Image (cartoon, rainbow, N blue to C red):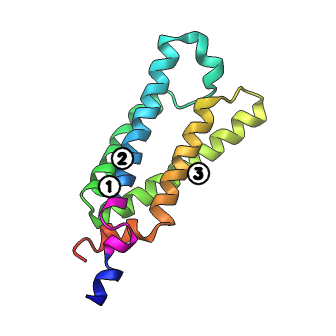
Amino acid sequence: MHGAVHGPSASGGPALPRFAALLAAAFVALVWGGIWLRNAAPAVAPLLGQAIGATGAMFITPIALAAAAGLWLRKPWGWWFSVIIVAYQTVSYLLFLMVVLASGDATGLLTWLTGLWLLALLVVLLLLPGTRRGCISPSL
């Protein structure tokens, strides 16, 4: 009975990997939604600012969805793969943001929302131990 307090349910358990999976899938929706909105209503492009284009989205989509599937299924490879790709994407985004800011290009809602979404995913993956534990030791 005492051991049940320290089980995965006390630290988020299987819910945290699934939450991370939803964040990864929602990131794909955010990227494609931004592309769609930019094309459907060009007048709002200045409000949205710089963001990932269609070529980047076609590259990111299958990778992010594979990571989301691995997290959803709570597989060890899913957690490791997600950590690697989210860290890479975050560094890539920070470099992109530095170029945008240094060049004086407009930043907007989509520019900052993309960065916040990546940061949230990184926090859930790395700073909440229940996410890793839910994938690495799903049977506990």
Picture residue at 33% right of the left edge, 40% below the top: 62
**Which SS does the magenta portion mostly show?**
helix
Q: Quadrant of residue 100?
A: top right
Question: Helix, strand, or loop for circle 2?
Answer: helix
Q: Mark 3 or mark 1, which has the lower sequence index?
A: 1
Q: Nearer the viewer, residue 101 or 137?
A: 137
102, above or below 37, in the image: below
* Place of residue 10 in the rendered image (x, y in percent of width and height, measured from the top left): 36, 73
Residue 139 in magenta? no
* Place of residue 63 in the rendered image (x, y in percent of width and height, measured from the top left): 36, 45
Picture residue at 37% right of the left edge, 38% below the top: 61
Q: Give the numbered dot on residue 39.
A: none
Q: Is residue 60 visible?
A: no
Picture residue at 76% right of the left edge, 31% below the top: 103
16, above or below 8, in the image: above
1 and 2 marks in contact (CB < 8 Å): yes
Estimate the spatial distance between the alpha carbons at disc 1 and disc 2, rounded to whole Å.
Answer: 6 Å
60, above or below 119, in the image: above
Estimate the spatial distance between the alpha carbons at disc 3 and disc 2, rounded to whole Å.
Answer: 21 Å
Q: Mark 1 highlights which residue?
A: 18
* Place of residue 32 in the rendered image (x, y in percent of width and height, measured from the top left): 42, 28
Q: Mark 3 highlights which residue?
A: 91
3 and 1 marks in contact (CB < 8 Å): no
Magenta segment boundaries in residue numbering: 8-16
In the figure, is residue 118 to the left or right of 71?
right
* Place of residue 31 in the rendered image (x, y in percent of width and height, measured from the top left): 46, 32
Q: Is residue 100 visible?
A: yes
